[in-house]
Image: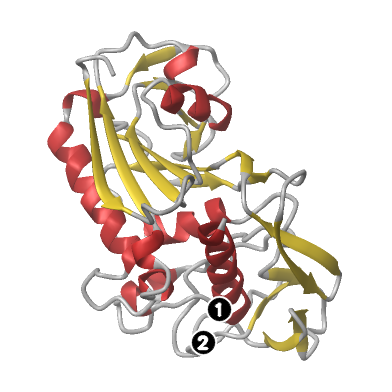
């Protein structure tokens, strides 16, 4: 590694595995501003290692369920958490250019967008060749909203087969492009966990979509009126629909509907958790199918 980088192992994961499940958090060397413009500038995070390190600590807490009042604990399960490797990489001093820019600023909103096709080559340059989910942290002065892309699975390799009402799919062990997240250094609450839900899911084997908008169909969202009693059948088990989007309600213009909630008193993690009725978003949990799907996908990748 060049002298302008600091790599830390936050969690060692399953050291008995050649390719343990790996989450990487990297400081973004350069911003494309705006997205798809071909204009690149230094990301302020490159001169703010303390802010980056604090964000790494926050991401770990959000994922592993140690935020104050946090109720979503599926990653903290003792059969899962010790098997996950977490690595941070702070990079500074690179010239802003397309080959090292991991994050772009959306030209029509305040979203940060991961430049997903660049991640593998950048991380490989620092000896990080096994990547399942990667967070790129930015300190953009204008764009603060996080976003994520799903994983591009390697469907030519093995996995754990599962069924949905619509067919047979696989929790693939390996990927062609990891799930990628663009995250602002000031992110808090369940944001890192929410984006992980997107990033761990798959383009070809089940995508976990946002539930706070009238989204296109995904693993956790369907479109129909009237709302049917059954949401889906996952691995042979029938799961009910959330007929009322408990706690929030479906806007009259929506055709989306969701899976049953684990706690009907609170929005799902993939929904608007900021609208928790008691003002504590950390009380929100995943809906039933999202929780089981993400847990199974993690377990499959951990077993490879």
Task: Give me the residue at 46% from left, 60% from top.
Answer: 194
| Residue 148 point in image, percent of width and height | 52, 46
Whether label 2 touches label 1, CB < 8 Å: yes
| Residue 302 point in image, percent of width and height | 50, 59
Earlier-in-chain disc, 2 versus 1: 2
* Count of marks overlaid on the render: 2
Any mark on residue 287, and which? 1
- Secondary element type, mark 2: loop
Side (left or right) of 197 relative to 51? right
> Is residue 11 visible in the rendered structure shown here?
yes
Query: Is 297 or 302 nearer to us in this picture?
Result: 302
Placement of 281 over or under 181, stated as above or below: below
Side (left or right) of 287 relative to 79? right
For marks 2 and 1, give the CA distance: 6 Å
Query: Is 15 or 184 nearer to us in this picture?
Result: 15
Task: Give me the residue at 55% from left, 55% from top.
Answer: 200
The residue beneath circle 2 is 262
Side (left or right) of 304 relative to 257? left
Placement of 283 over or under 66, stated as above or below: below
Disc 1 packing (10 Å; few <14; some 14–19; many ≥20): many
Query: Is 234 or 33 nearer to us in this picture?
Result: 234
Task: Give me the residue at 25% from left, 70% from top.
Answer: 66
- Secondary element type, mark 1: loop
> Is residue 189 visible in the rendered structure shown here?
no
Task: Give me the residue at 34% from left, 8% from top.
Answer: 95
Q: Residue lying farthest right?
A: 167
| Residue 264 point in image, percent of width and height | 51, 90
Q: Quadrant of residue 193?
A: bottom left
């Amino acid at each position: 590694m060049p002298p302008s980088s600091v790599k830390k192992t936050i969690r060692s994961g399953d050291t008995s595995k050649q390719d343990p499940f790996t989450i990487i958090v990297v400081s973004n060397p350069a911003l494309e501003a705006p997205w798809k413009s071909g204009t690149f500038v230094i990301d302020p995070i490159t001169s703010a290692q303390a802010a980056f390190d604090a964000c790494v600590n926050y991401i770990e807490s959000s994922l592993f369920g140690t935020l104050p009042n946090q109720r979503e604990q599926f990653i903290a399960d003792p059969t899962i958490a010790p098997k996950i490797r977490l690595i941070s990489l702070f990079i500074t001093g690179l010239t802003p250019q397309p080959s090292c820019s991991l994050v772009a600023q959306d030209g029509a909103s305040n979203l940060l967008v991961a430049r997903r096709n660049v991640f593998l080559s950048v991380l490989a340059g620092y000896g990080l060749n096994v990547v399942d989910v990667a967070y790129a942290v930015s300190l953009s002065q204008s764009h603060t909203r996080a976003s994520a892309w799903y994983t591009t699975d390697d469907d030519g390799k093995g996995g754990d087969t599962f069924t949905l009402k619509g067919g047979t799919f696989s929790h693939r062990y390996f990927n062609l492009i990891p799930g990628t997240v663009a995250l602002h250094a000031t992110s808090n609450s369940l944001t890192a966990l929410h984006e992980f839900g997107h990033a761990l899911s798959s383009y070809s084997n089940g995508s976990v979509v946002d539930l706070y908008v009238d989204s296109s169909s995904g693993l956790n969202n369907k479109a129909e009126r009237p709302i049917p009693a059954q949401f889906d059948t996952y691995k042979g088990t029938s799961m009910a629909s959330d007929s009322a989007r408990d706690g929030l309600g479906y806007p009259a213009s929506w055709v989306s509907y969701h899976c049953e909630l684990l706690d009907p008193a609170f929005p799902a993690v993939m929904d608007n958790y900021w609208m928790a009725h008691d003002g504590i978003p950390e009380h929100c949990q995943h809906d039933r199918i999202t929780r089981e799907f993400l847990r199974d996908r993690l377990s499959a990748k951990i077993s490879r």
